[in-house]
Amino acid sequence: MGHTRRAFLGAVGAVALGASRAEALPNYISGKVIQEALDKARDGKGPKDAAGRFIAKPGKGTYLLTEPLIIHGDTHLDVTGIRIVARFPATGVKKTMVLNAVAASTGGYDAPGNIAITGGSWDPTWDFFQRGVGDKAPPMNVITLIHTKNVVLDGITIYNTKHWHAIELNAIRDATVRNCALLGWIADPKQGLWHGEALQLDLPTGANTWAGKADGTPCRSIVMRGNTCDKSGSQLGFGQFTGSHTTHPGVTHSDVLVENNVVRNARWDGIGAYNWQNVRILGNRVENCEGGIYVKSADANKTFEITGNTVSGTRTRPGVGIRAVQPISDVMVSGNTVTPCSFDYVGDVAFRRPPQRC
């Protein structure tokens, strides 16, 4: 927001700068065409993938969404080679480009699952900037999944998310996010940069319940592997690649693997873990971020392994930091390369073995 049209076009290379705004816009295909493909998959029509999901695969082109796509259980949305942009109204629809189908009475992980989304170039703000009204783009997520299980997000590219999250997993069990590129973020001037997670683990309480019950169900068994989080050609980076900023007493996200990701130019910490337990942060590269890898508890947490990561170019925040607001036990920090060297351990942290220090 606030960037010139020249800067924005530099990210996408869409048109000559001399073209009019009308000429700059592609011949959009209605997002309803994608929804029709999703509904056919819901109805058991078409081919299946190896996991038994019906495949929804729309034709090539640039699609314009004015409301969320709703993906059902046992569905694989394959948008490889397809561009999807948004022109959502300021009010009247939920602010996410994708949401799964969840009945109002559904809690836990009981919404229809076995969902995959593969590929695609997703951009919730591009159309607004092309039309010269970038400030009118509403804050929104791109992909939001809630109260479900057995999820795969693979090879997705997301550009220039405004204020919220590229991907939000909310009350999700057994999910893998792999080979995705989460690029560019427009910060909310009313929130701290720590609030800007590209990939957020959340739980449904109050206003952050997108569908179903506000029952505080946490995320469990989440894998984040081989992703890239960075700035785009027109916007700065996210606040963080991973993290959470919502808590509920006595509830923690658990069984999380953050492995072999590349995080650059985050404006807070590259990798955050807030009120998670049984977490392995392994083999990641964090470059040119304000801080590196930062773990914080709200309730008592346990079992963190931070090993084999490379952190470089941090500034005012630690390369590796652990803050125990409530006790954190069974922690291992070893084999990381941190330049400049900075390890910071605060509060009641019980280490499995002597931790890595400068």
Image: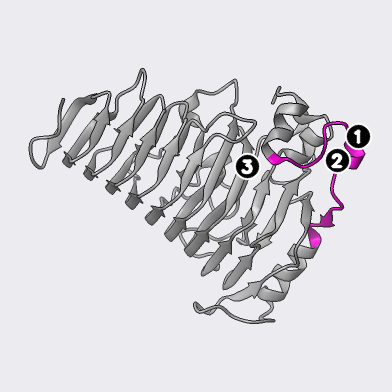
Amino acid type at circle 2 is Ala
Q: Is 21 a magenta residue?
A: yes
Question: Is disc 3 placed on a helix, strand or loop?
Answer: strand
Q: Quadrant of residue 320?
A: top left
Q: Which residue has dot 1 on it? A: 20
Q: Is 53 a magenta residue?
A: no
Binning the other alpha carbons within 10 Å of mark 2 as few (below 14), some (14 to 19) or many (20 upward) gives some
**Dots 3 and 1: beta carbons under 8 Å?**
no
Q: Main secondary structure of the magenta part?
A: loop
Binning the other alpha carbons within 10 Å of mark 1 as few (below 14), some (14 to 19) or many (20 upward) gives few
Query: Residue 64 shows which numbered tag?
Result: none
Is 29 above or below relative to 11?
A: below
Q: Which residue has dot 2 on it? A: 24
**Dots 2 and 1: beta carbons under 8 Å?**
yes
Is 26 above or below relative to 239?
A: below
Amino acid type at circle 3 is Tyr
Label whose residue precedes the other's in the sequence (3 or 2): 2
Amino acid type at circle 1 is Ser
Label whose residue precedes the other's in the sequence (3 or 1): 1
Q: Position of residue 93 (x, y in %)?
A: 74, 46
Q: Is residue 164 visible?
A: no
Query: Residue 159 shows which numbered tag?
Result: 3
Magenta region, residue range: 12-32
Question: Is disc 1 placed on a helix, strand or loop?
Answer: loop
For the residues carrying marks 3 and 1, which lies nearer the camera in this image?
Answer: 1
For the residues carrying marks 3 and 2, which lies nearer the camera in this image?
Answer: 2
